[in-house]
Image (cartoon, rainbow, N blue to C red):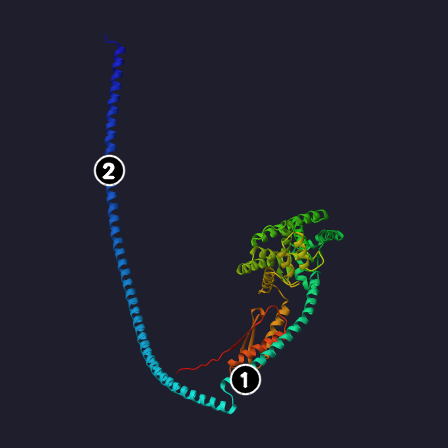
Amino acid sequence: MVNPVVIISIAAACGVLVAIIAALVAFRLGISYRKKIAEAEIGSAEEEAKKIVDDAYKAAQSKKKEALLEAKDEIHKARVEADKEIKERRNEITRQERRIQQKEETLDKKTEALEKKDEKLNEKMKELDVEKEELGKVRAKQMEELERISGLTAEDAKQFLLKNVESEVRHEAAMMIRDIESQAKEEAEKKAKNIIGLAIQKCAADHVAETTVSVVSLPNDEMKGRIIGREGRNIRTIESLTGVELIIDDTPEAVIISSFDPIRREVARLALEKLIMDGRIHPARIEEMVERAQKEVDATIKQEGEQATFDTGVHGLHPELIKLLGRLRYRTSYGQNVLKHSIEVSHVAGIMAGELGVDITIAKRAGLLHDIGKAVDHEIEGSHVTIGVDLARKYKEGANVIHAIEAHHGDVEANSIVACLVQAADAISAARPGARRENIETYIKRLQKLEEIATSFDGVEKSFAIQAGREVRIMVKPDRIGDGDMDFIAREIVKKIESDMEYPGQIKVNIIRETRTVAFAK
């Protein structure tokens, strides 16, 4: 009898085998089905791709045709425009050729006319030569007749005229001597005016306000009250510490600092600007700012003095003289900065000394120090020349330098070439155009007076004062004034100017006589 367990095992194995076979058959059937589906999808995709390619080819062909048509249109338009431009250029060339041809014809006609004129001029020149010879003969006969009538030969007449001219020249020389004498008498009055002017310059008068005041800008008008302080204590502190006068008036957003001493004025200006910027204004702060401003000004003075010696090449000066030179930066004379003036005089004197073979170093040194007295002439009695001589002696300068300082304004006679060079350089620097200011009203009146004197003479048509009054150009009437009269009228105008006017330097009288002839060729 068969074991039931074995039978069950066999049956189970047969079930598993059947299941495996069934799975294999199902797997194969699935693969076949998916293959058919994939083949169908590939076929449809190939058809779709073929369709897309065909559509793209057709679109490309249509685009190609459109592009060809557009290109043909553009080429046609370009040809039309090119033809039009060529036609216009041809027309322009034709017009230019006609113009050139017309100009050539005109030039030919003018050339023929000029040749005819040349022929006529040659004929006239020949006639003039003949007339000149005849005039020469007539003149010779006239001279013979004049000699016979007067009883004098040409040489005797010449000597007679020379004697007359000599007497006139002597008369003019006598007049010049008289003018020099009268000028010498006027020198005393001029010197008195200079002394008065120096005295006026040493006090803060109204007419020198532009050189004795400084203006400090304020952020607002409320700052004026803070500067004045309670019961005026701030303004009194500033004035007592700096030695200046503060003018606070109706001028909007500004305070005026008045002082004859430029150093004090500069210290006050710097201190006030620092106080305004800081905002804290009270007596203790004012003292601190004034002290700081004084230090800054002292440092600037020293730096400016050293820079002046470096610029001029003058070395070995005493340190106190260098400081005094720096103080000249804040000193002006008729609007001219004295330090710049001294540097300029040093350079000019050195150049002239080099040309004359004189010691350039001494000339430059004397030129730089010639106005050193102006640095302290507000503090010491006496003229700046005397003060400068005393300072130069105090700081052991050489005799040539001291004499040049003493003689640069003619207080003593210059007895050395260096002193003469410093005199000349000082005059050149002060008298050059633009170096020194003068009152605008006086300046305008002087120009008007100059033109009035020139136009007052008979035969003068117009006159123009130019070069800041250093030259007057006079247009005379050619039918009234001849070439021979121009020297005479120039001399008369010069005499009139010298007698009626006061002016710096010299005035050039330039007389112009012009004859114009206008003709029209038709």
Q: Nearer the viewer, residue 353 or 253?
A: 353
Quadrant including the C terminus: bottom left
Q: Quadrant of residue 328?
A: bottom right
Amino acid type, mark 1? Phe
- Residue 173 visible in the displayed image: yes
Q: Nearer the viewer, residue 340 or 400?
A: 400
Q: Nearer the viewer, residue 104 or 69?
A: 104
**Residue at (26, 24) in percent of width and height:** 23
How crowded pointer 1 is (Cα within 10 Å; few <14, some 14-19, many 20+) is rated as few
**Residue at (58, 68) in percent of width and height:** 468
Q: Comparing marks 1 and 2, which lies closer to the viewer? A: 1
Q: Is residue 152 above or below residue 436?
A: below
Quick check: marks 1 and 2 in contact, CB under 8 Å?
A: no
**Residue at (49, 78) in percent of width and height:** 514
What is the C-alpha distance between the residues marked 1 and 2? Answer: 148 Å
How crowded pointer 2 is (Cα within 10 Å; few <14, some 14-19, many 20+) is rated as few
Total numbered labels placed on residues in the image: 2
Q: Is residue 38 above or below residue 145?
A: above
Per the rendering, the mark at residue 372 is none
Residue pointed to by mark 1: 160
Residue pointed to by mark 2: 40
Amino acid type, mark 2? Ala
Secondary structure, mark 2, is: helix
Residue that protrudes farthest toward the right in the picture: 231
Quadrant including the N terminus: top left
Secondary structure, mark 1, is: helix
- Residue 253 visible in the displayed image: no
